[in-house]
Amino acid sequence: MTSENIYKSLVELYNKGITEKDPKIIREFLNDNTHMALKEEPRFFLDILQHRAAAFALFGELTEAGQEYAKGYSSCSTSGKWVYGLNWALQYMAEFSINRVKAKLNESLSQALPVLEQSEKDLVFDQYREFYQLALCNVKAFVLMSLGEKDKALETYKDCLFTPVPIPAYNDKESLQLLFAHYTKGLAVAIEYKDAELLNSLLKVISLDDALLQNEKNLFKLFYETLVSTFDMRAEFITEFNAMFKIKEGLKTVAPGFARFLSLIGEQDFDKLDVFFKDFK
């Protein structure tokens, strides 16, 4: 069989298992080692490894999922390494959805940290580098917050410039998707620690309303109007926010303040939210 045929056969098997929701077929896919024959074809090999990682994650086997990513790191292009590493680290965060004991969460998240640190080293030098850096910082800070490392979580942002997203990049739905897709994680850190300075800095990056930023003294109103505006503009932002809402029960043990915020948002209790934000310092 050619590499392409092996690849197509494996993807077909994976998709069949997912479509039919059949764990036996998914396990059959994982037990098929023909994927190693694709190693000389990075475009096929890396994609299959990510399929395998996703399959392991479905069984709650997150260490094994990470091991699949590890197999492919050396096959990544120089420019693609940091994104690959980010996706690798995110596999460990599936523990929030599985919602097992806190010790298991800590074990999984601890594995994400060195991967994220390597992704920071692998960042490309292009016009959007500082925004990619902020995306990684948001994920890393969220992980550290979840591990109870407040000082380290906040220290993550020390080199961030918090430059506003340029309007052309904001309007281009294909641009800076990874920034917006992981922005709620940064907002979660600021909200959990009731850190007004960090929250304002993060809002400055994604706000399209300079007058609102400069003149609005009510922090909740500033936050909420910026949030709604960004929801309208960037689908990946609202997708992540909704994903956070779905795991709010699992967040109660590691980020009770942020979990409380999510509950109030769900209840649309704006009076209580206004009070909640008045405690920010």
Image (spheres, rainbow, N blue to C red):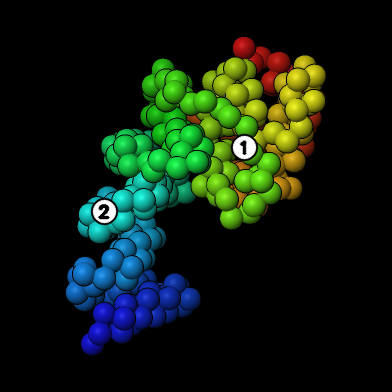
Residue at 22% x, 54% y: name it.
74
Query: Badge 1, how many Cα within 10 Å: few under 14, some, many 20+?
Result: some
Q: Secondary structure at mark 2?
A: helix
Residue at 69% x, 21% y: name it.
276
- Taking 123 as reference, is 158 above or below it? above
Image quarter of residue 140: top left
Tell whether 174 sits left or right of 112: right
Image quarter of residue 214: top right
Q: Earlier in the sequence, mark 1 or mark 2?
A: 2
- Taking 264 as reference, is 154 above or below it? above
Q: CA distance from mark 1 to mark 2?
A: 30 Å
Residue on which disc 1 sits: 165
Q: Secondary structure at mark 1?
A: loop
- Taking 37 as reference, is 168 above or below it? above
Where is the C terminus found, in terms of image quarters? top right
Mark 1 or mark 2: which is in front?
A: 1
Residue at 31% x, 37% y: name it.
121
Circle number at residue 203: none
In this view, the residue farthest toward the bottom is 1
Query: Badge 2, how many Cα within 10 Å: few under 14, some, many 20+?
Result: some
Residue 230 in picture, x, y percent from top left: 70, 42
Residue 190 in picture, x, y percent from top left: 56, 25
Residue 120 appears in the figure? yes
Q: Amino acid at mark 1?
A: Val
Number of marks in picture: 2
Where is the N terminus found, in terms of image quarters? bottom left
> Which residue is nearer to you in this view: 229 or 161?
161
In this view, the residue farthest toward the top is 281
> Which residue is nearer to you in this view: 267 or 132?
132
Q: Amino acid at mark 2?
A: Tyr
Residue 243 appears in the figure? no
Circle number at residue 73: 2
